[in-house]
Image: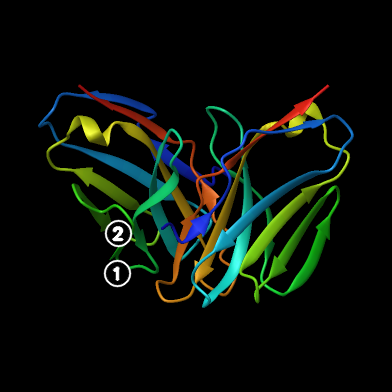
């Protein structure tokens, strides 16, 4: 049972390049999230999807787009990468409900040069 | 102001002592709260969740919630060096219905 799987684990981009971070979960969870983590900033919510077919902005959505492809998959796209998007990106999933215990993928370390 | 606030630390405690980690939140509508542990270079791992006022115990960990004071805490009894990590507090629900994290508190348990 893999849980939440993110690809790639590491990526280096040049400024202006685009890329898509992939996330898939096999826990049949309804909700999925994308966070970024920078030193001293904790986890900041970029986008989330409460259920299949819905997406909503989080705390720091600018420069990102998402697609909830199906119940299992939630992708994050950087259309034109900037050095400020250098970060560690985490995908998470949870059930809907009053106490949505979220489980995280292993993270993607992205460097934009 | 962040919706969920934590002291960044570091909090240093001797081995065997009680570590007390604190968190405050601004959205009174928040329904449930979570404590995650994150080792350096690893992903966050869920330790405890709590949604009712009072205490919830699980082994050496006790989570406390006080909705009137908008305050959540995590106590770690008999702290071990292996507990040294960053502890993240998260809140869910309220106006945004999103899972929002604090900045985390770095705990160092000294042998």
The residue nearer to you, when weighing A68 against A83, is A83
For disc 1, the marked residue is: A53
Distance of label 2 from label 1 (alpha carbons): 6 Å
Q: Position of residue A106 (x, y in %)?
A: 49, 36
**x%, y% of residue A32?**
42, 58
Which callout, 2 or 1, points at the residue further toward the start of the chain? Answer: 1
Of helix, strand and loop, which one carries label 1?
loop
Q: Quadrant of the N terminus of chain A?
A: top right
Is residue B17 visible from the viewing direction of this image? yes
Q: Quadrant of residue A7?
A: top left
Label 1, residues with CA under 10 Å away: few <14, some 14-19, many ≥20: few
User: Can you see residue A95?
Assistant: no
- Residue drawn at x 45%, y 41% is A5
Residue situated in front as seen by the camera: A73 or B83: B83
The front one of A80 and A106 is A80
How many labels sit on residues?
Answer: 2
Please say if the residues under marks 2 and 1 sit with CB atoms less than 8 Å apart. yes
Residue that appears at 54% across and 42% down:
A2
Q: Circle 2 sits on which residue?
A: A68
Q: Secondary structure at mark 2?
A: strand
x and y, in percent, of residue B26 in the image: 50, 67
């Amino acid at each position: 049972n893999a849980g939440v799987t993110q690809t790639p684990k590491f990526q280096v981009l040049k400024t202006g390049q685009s890329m898509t971070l992939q996330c898939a979960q096999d826990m049949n969870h309804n909700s999925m999230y994308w966070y970024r983590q920078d030193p001293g900033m904790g986890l900041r919510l970029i986008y989330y999807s409460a259920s299949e077919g819905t997406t909503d902005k989080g705390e720091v959505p600018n420069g990102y787009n998402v697609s909830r492809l199906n119940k299992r998959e939630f992708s994050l796209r950087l259309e034109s990468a900037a050095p400020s998007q250098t970060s560690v990106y985490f995908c998470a999933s949870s059930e809907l409900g009053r106490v949505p215990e979220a489980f995280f993928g292993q993270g993607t370390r992205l460097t934009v040069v | 102001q962040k919706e969920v606030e934590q002291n960044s630390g570091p909090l240093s405690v001797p081995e065997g002592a009680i570590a007390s980690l604190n968190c405050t939140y601004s959205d009174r509508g928040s329904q449930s709260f979570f404590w995650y542990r994150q080792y350096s270079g690893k992903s966050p791992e869920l330790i405890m969740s709590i949604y009712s006022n009072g205490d919830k115990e699980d082994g050496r960990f006790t989570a406390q919630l006080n909705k009137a004071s908008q305050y959540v805490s995590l106590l770690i009894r008999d702290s071990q060096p292996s507990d040294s990590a960053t502890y993240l507090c998260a809140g869910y629900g309220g106006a945004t219905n999103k899972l929002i994290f604090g900045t985390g508190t770095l705990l160092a348990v000294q042998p």
